[in-house]
Image: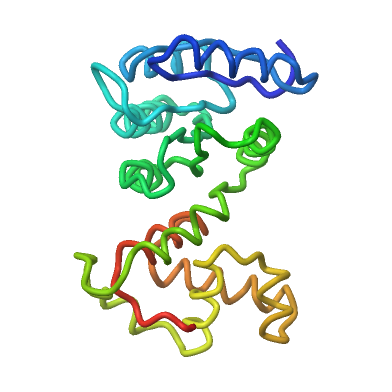
């Protein structure tokens, strides 16, 4: 089997069939297998060792969050390269999607996303990058207001310099390094350095976790 090997995990057989047809229409992608629940997903990951797994959040027996944690932990235990996990969710503001990202997923895609976006997301996470829909990023900040139950800013937030907080705010809104550089009159290399320092200070893995971190904490954001 050549190309990026993609596993499909969803409890709706009709949805899986549609995604299978989409994936198989691409010369550089191939379906490595299917599963209809979280337990079967863990078995599929160990048996087929796919490159990317499309993981539904809400499933019987074991949900996508717990399955993601187990799949990544098992790969680490066995010394295998873990699959990149792309969470599928119905809602922009699905708290379960945020939890899945904390569990190690590489991003999330809405189930009603354009086919081209889903295909691009598969290729993006396979290359080691993260995916979070720009619309979802905007909705996180439009929907979640102050005093809505988010946690206070952690102690690590105070370690960020004023410039790093500015970069954090722009990155959390979904801007790329190039867009931040243009906005702040900085070089892309400088922006990349700032983002790396922010991630390190806050103990975050990537920019997707940065967005979730901003969503979960009541932070003084730069407007």
Q: Left or right: where does residue 214 sit relative to residue 112? A: left
Q: Which residue is drawn at 47% across and 90% down?
A: 162
The image quarter in which residue 43 lies: top left
> Is 129 located above or below residue 122 in the figure?
below
Asked if residue 183 lies left or right of residue 216, the reply is: right
Indicate the quadrant where residue 196 lies. Answer: bottom right
Which percent across, then down, holds residue 207?
Answer: 52, 59
Which residue is found at the position 50% from the left and 67% from the top? Answer: 172
Give the vertical position of 159 relative to 25 (above or below).
below
* Residue 101, above or below 14: below
Q: How many marks?
A: 0
Residue beneath the point at 71% across and 84% down = 186
Image coordinates for residue 31, horizontal then vertical, percent: 62, 14
How has the structure been colored for display? rainbow
Q: Where's residue 220, x and y in %?
A: 36, 82
Q: Residue furthest bottom?
A: 162
Which of the image's four quarters has the N terminus? top right
Observer-nearest of 212 and 44: 212
Q: Position of residue 25 (x, y in %)?
A: 75, 16
């Amino acid at each position: 089997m050549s190309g990026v090997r993609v596993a499909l995990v969803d409890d709706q057989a009709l949805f899986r069939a549609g995604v299978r047809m989409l994936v198989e229409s691409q010369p550089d992608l191939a379906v490595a297998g299917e599963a209809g629940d979280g337990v079967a997903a863990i078995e599929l990951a160990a048996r087929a060792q796919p490159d990317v797994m499309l993981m539904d959040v809400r499933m019987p027996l074991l949900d996508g969050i717990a399955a993601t944690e187990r799949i990544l932990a098992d790969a680490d235990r066995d010394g295998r390269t873990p699959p990149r996990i792309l969470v599928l969710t119905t809602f922009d503001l699905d708290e379960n999607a945020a939890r899945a990202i904390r569990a190690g997923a590489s991003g999330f895609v809405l189930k009603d996303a354009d086919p081209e976006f889903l295909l691009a997301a598969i290729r993006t996470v396979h290359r080691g990058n993260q995916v979070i829909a720009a619309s979802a990023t905007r909705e996180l900040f439009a929907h979640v207001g102050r005093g809505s139950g988010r946690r206070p800013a952690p102690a690590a937030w105070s370690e960020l310099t004023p410039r790093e907080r500015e970069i954090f705010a722009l990155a959390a809104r979904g801007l790329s390094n190039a867009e931040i550089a243009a906005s702040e009159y900085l070089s892309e290399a400088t922006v990349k350095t700032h983002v790396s320092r922010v991630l390190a200070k806050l103990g975050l893995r990537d920019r997707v976790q940065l967005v979730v971190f901003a969503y979960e904490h009541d932070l003084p954001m730069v407007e």
